[in-house]
Amino acid sequence: MSEIPKISSVMTPSPKTVEANHTIRDVRHLMQDFGIHHVPVTLA
């Protein structure tokens, strides 16, 4: 049976996030600038 990995081994240590009140344009620029495809959205 294989060992279950620790969450720290599969998570991004300091992910880029946006608040819910950001515009789609802001998020698109963030994604393009950092070459990312998924952005967690937090409550403002």
Image (cartoon, grey):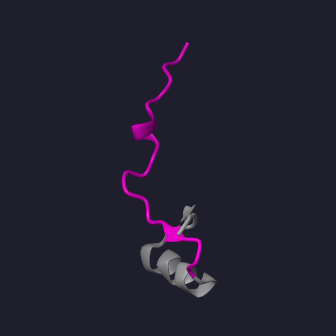
Q: Residue at x 52, y 18 (%)?
A: 2
Compared with residue 8, is residue 18 higher up or lower down, i.e. above or below? below
Q: In the image, is residue 9 part of the stretch drawn in magenta?
A: yes
User: Which x, y percent locates residue 9?
Assistant: 41, 38
Q: Which residue, as the protein is rendered here, is positioned at the far left? A: 13
Q: Nearer the viewer, residue 22 or 8?
A: 22
Compared with residue 40, is residue 7 higher up or lower down, i.e. above or below? above
Q: Residue at x 37, y 51 (%)?
A: 13
Q: Which residue, as the protein is rendered here, is positioned at the far bottom? A: 25
Count how many numbered circles sit on residues in the image.
0
Q: Which residue, as the protein is rendered here, is positioned at the far right? A: 24
Q: Residue 7, located in which quarter of the rendered image?
A: top left
Q: Which residue, as the protein is rendered here, is positioned at the far top? A: 1
Q: Magenta part mainly helix, strand or loop?
A: loop
Q: In the image, is residue 43 part of the stretch drawn in magenta?
A: no
Q: Which residues are magenta?
A: 1-22
Q: Nearer the viewer, residue 35 or 28?
A: 28
Q: Residue at x 53, y 84 (%)?
A: 26
Compared with residue 25, is residue 35 higher up or lower down, i.e. above or below? above
Compared with residue 9, is residue 30 higher up or lower down, i.e. above or below? below
Which quarter of the rendered picture does the N terminus lie within? top right
Q: Residue at x 51, y 70 (%)?
A: 18
User: Which x, y percent locates residue 10?
Assistant: 46, 42
